[in-house]
Image: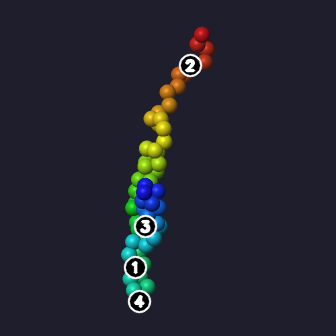
């Protein structure tokens, strides 16, 4: 179900926003709308992954004993 929704969002973002009949007029989604769709899908994918997305490391400066 979620995979179908992701595919639908991808197809809608890739397709035209508006199309007219015999005149041949086509309007694409704006760049900001395409970027928003990409961010939405990326955030859904990141939410599926395990972990918190934060890495904790210990930094030791050189010369410290």
Q: CA distance from mark 2 to mark 3?
A: 49 Å
Q: Earlier in the sequence, mark 4 or mark 2?
A: 4
Q: Secondary structure at mark 2?
A: loop
Marks 3/1: CA–CA distance = 13 Å
Write down the residue under mark 4. Answer: 22
| Circle 1 residues within 10 Å: few <14, some 14–19, many ≥20 | few
* Mark 2 or mark 1, earlier in chain: 1
Which label sits in the foreground, 2 or 1?
A: 1
How many C-alpha atoms fall within 10 Å of the one at disc 3: few (<14), some, or many (≥20)?
A: some
Say above or below: 56 vs 37. Answer: above
Task: For marks 2 and 1, give the CA distance.
Answer: 60 Å
Label at residue 12: 3
Image vertical order of residue 50 relative to residue 14, above or below: above
Q: Nearer the viewer, residue 60 or 47?
A: 47
The earlier-in-sequence mark between 4 and 3 is 3
**Tag shown at residue 60:** 2
Residue at x-position 45% and y-position 35%: 52
> Residue 15, position in %: x, y?
45, 70
| Quarter of the image where one finds residue 36 | bottom left
Q: Nearer the viewer, mark 2 or mark 3?
A: 3
Q: Please tell me which residue is depicted at 39% across the width and 61% down the height of the picture.
A: 33
Point 46% across, 56% down: residue? 3
Give the farthest residue toward the top: 65
């Amino acid at each position: 179900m979620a995979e179908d929704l992701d595919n639908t969002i991808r197809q809608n973002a890739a397709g035209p926003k508006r199309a007219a009949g015999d005149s041949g007029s086509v309007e694409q989604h704006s760049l900001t709308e395409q970027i928003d769709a990409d961010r939405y899908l990326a955030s859904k994918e990141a939410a599926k992954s395990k972990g918190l997305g934060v890495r904790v490391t210990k930094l030791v400066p050189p010369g410290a004993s």
